[in-house]
Image (cartoon, rainbow, N blue to C red):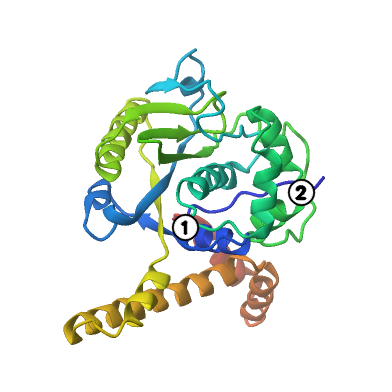
Amino acid sequence: MSEWNTIESDAGVFTRLITDLGVEGLQFEDIPYLDYLESEDISSILEGLVFLFPYKKSLYQNPEPVQGRYETDSTKVFFSQQTIQNACATQAVLNILFNLSQDKKEKVHLGPELSQFYEFVKDFHEPALIGETINGSELIRNVHNSFTPPNLFVMDEDPYRNRGQSQEVYHFVGFIPHESRIYELDGLQPYPIDHGPYTDFAKDVKTLLQERMDILVQQGVQKFNIIGLILDRLQYLQTELEKDDIPDGKRFVLSEQLQEELNKREKWKEEITFRKHNLTGLALELLKQISSSMSENEFESVLREASMKPSN
């Protein structure tokens, strides 16, 4: 069976991921800072979010989660465990989608393939078995892997190759409002986590995330990323502009917002195109052309300087 590749934590990638899976009515949006969750621009249309952080083994060694409590009743919330290496991003997204599609059937549509998949697994009630079934889905795996370029080289599969090297591993978890409560969907946990009732999802999940970040910071973690799942802005703006009774001033604002959204989608498209192509061949060809006019000593000097520059 083919492996699953890692994909980037990016709103454009996640939006294209669910679109390619057939989902309609939703998109992802980057959350640049926690207070943005309470902004008027997003709080009313926030349907869930994905939280990325460096994996810490200590978070998973206790019998209870670091926040909230396990919900062991499998009939209350859909949940699948992660049984696939490198698939935590798609795992988190699917856990969110399968709950949201049932909570907001009038606004969110999974599409025929994912709907059929959900109907097949919804009564399993065994998170690990659902995870294994996701692993066996050629559609989901192929869409997930489409955001990384093909590897032109045969990699060394020696398991000891990186022994002794410290490498940061990142993990994705989902948060959703469901049945008037906030649930955390972490595929590395045995069950979904119930964080209790909420009054305002955007405000309350912000507080929850701040507390989680504080816990992680105490363990030396400094890097986080949050991506919100919202109702499709493009669809909303186009629907609003089709109305005949909106004032000219509002129509102008909506038109500006629509153009901004179209520009953002075009930028996403360009960035995803680069991600899907392995540019090694192009880089090597450019390197050959540059080096053709240099002496061996000059070329070695350029390589030394390049290797000393810090990478971002």
Question: Sequence-wise, which precedes: disc 2 or disc 1?
Answer: 1
Label 2 neighbour load within 10 Å: few <14, some 14-19, many 20+: few
> Which residue corresponds to the image point at 67% horizontal and 59% vertical from the top-left?
112
Q: Name the residue beneath numbered marker 2.
A: 155
Please state if 78 lies on the left or on the right of 159 as rendered. Answer: left
Q: Position of residue 32 (x, y in %)?
A: 31, 54
> Which residue corresponds to the image point at 53% horizontal and 42% vertical from the top-left?
92
**Residue 121 vertical position relative to residue 254 in the rendered view, above or below:** above
> Which residue corresponds to the image point at 20% horizontal and 79% vertical from the top-left?
250
Q: Name the residue beneath numbered marker 1.
A: 106
**Residue 123 vertical position relative to residue 93 in the rendered view, above or below:** above
Q: Circle 2 — which element? A: loop
**Farthest right residue in view:** 1
Q: Position of residue 152 (x, y in %)?
A: 76, 61
Which of pointers 2 and 1 indicates the residue nearer the eye? 1
Q: Circle 1 — which element? A: loop
> Which residue corresponds to the image point at 78% horizontal and 36% vertical from the top-left?
158
Q: Nearer the viewer, residue 201 or 294?
A: 201
Does residue 234 appear anywhere in the picture? yes
Check disc 2 and give the amino acid type: Met
Check disc 1 and give the amino acid type: Glu
Q: Position of residue 231 (x, y in %)?
A: 40, 60
Q: Quadrant of the N terminus?
A: top right
**Residue 218 vertical position relative to residue 280 in the rendered view, above or below:** above
The image quadrant that residue 211 belongs to is top left
Work out how far the residue at label 2 is from the one at label 1, CA to CA, in angstroms: 47 Å
